[in-house]
Image: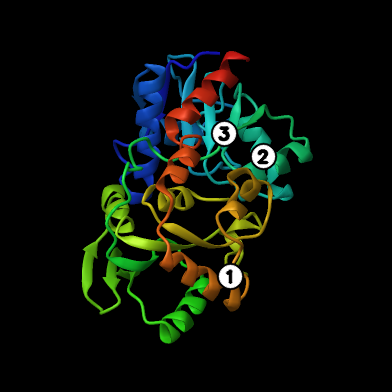
Amino acid sequence: MELEGILTQRAWEKRVSFDLVYAWEDIFAREFGIPLVGRNRMAEAVFRRLPGRQSVPTGRKFLWLTEMEPMPGKNAYNCPQVIPYWVDFFLREPSLPGLVRSYNACPAIFVSSREAFEFLREQGTGLPLYHLALSLPDGVLTDELPEKEYDVALMGRPDTVLEGYFRRYAAEHPCTFVYRRMEQGRFLYYDHTGACLGEVDNHEKYMNLMRLCRVGLYATPGLEKADGRTHGFCQVTPRFLEFLGAGCHVLMRYRPNPDTDYYGLKSFCPSADTYHVFERTLTDFLRHPVDMEQYRNYLSRHITSARARELQQILSSL
């Protein structure tokens, strides 16, 4: 099985969260020597309304399609020419029949989460599933440790437990930090003095701010009761790799599962399930800079070009 193109929605999907997807697409296109193929938004809407199993004509064989998450409804690309890649997966048993109907014509389906992949395999869906983990775009990791200005980064999706621990820590151990605030639909970042650092509206600005910090707070989604959208799945997200790429220690809260085992989170730090563990870990991290050689060795297995080689090996066997 040989890819001939990569379907992309960059012409009309401009949300910041898709910057990382487009970086993956660019590197896959370069590594495979294949073109980007623009998705037809209007054709997709039309084909979703047609009766029976209809799909958008692709004119190529085979095409790679990255989806933020699968949709157990009418899939405009349920056809033998399209290979989907699911970034997030939060569906449970009641949704699986619809999922199968929406993807049963695809020749192969790749799942980023090891936890979700093993769940689906155990459920016996009959779909041709393969695991391909998330990655960090090549070039994000610098050779030298970036110069640091702040102690702690509170970036991305918040975790109320970690943030509560940090507020207590900051009251007992004064430190510098940056945090995010949503204002009028924009993500603005501030430092510990209340000074606004500006809007972070693309991945480059996001990484540049992250590089200024010594420690990043990170939790896998699904740990908090209020986060019902994950239905109990706690997959590792790209922010973990991004913190490493920025030369940050990563102070984490997570529940051990196949995904955390795959990325080896325990080798970086224990899960901060109590304030005592949080305080001890953060104090230690602030005393010692990260080992950039160790980070480079680790990330060499998790950069996007490495994933492209993994994908090539899997496809060549199909």
Q: Are marks 3 and 2 in contact (CB under 8 Å)?
A: no
Question: In front: mark 2 or mark 1?
Answer: 2
**Residue 258 or 249: which is nearer the viewer?**
249
Q: Is residue 266 left or right of residue 137?
A: right
Q: Is residue 79 left or right of residue 123?
A: left
Q: Rounded to the nearest whole Å, what is the CA distance between mark 1 and mark 3? A: 29 Å
Residue drawn 74% across the image and 48% down it: 93
Q: Which residue is mark 1?
A: 226
Residue 187 falls in which quadrant of the image? bottom left
Disc 2 or 1, which lies upstream in sequence?
A: 2
Q: Which residue is mark 3?
A: 132
- Residue 208 appears anywhere in the view: yes
Residue drawn 47% across the image and 38% down it: 297
User: Residue 234: x, y in percent?
Assistant: 62, 55
Mark 1 is on which residue type? Ala
Residue drawn 34% across the image and 62% down it: 213
Q: Which residue is mark 2?
A: 117
> SS at mark 1?
loop
For this orientation, the residue located farthest to the front is 288
Q: Rounded to the nearest whole Å, what is the CA distance between mark 3 and mark 2? A: 9 Å
Q: Are marks 2 and 1 in contact (CB under 8 Å)?
A: no
The crowding category of the residue bearing disc 3, from other C-alpha atoms within 10 Å (few below 14, some 14 to 19, many at least 20), is many
User: Residue 122: x, y in percent?
Assistant: 78, 40
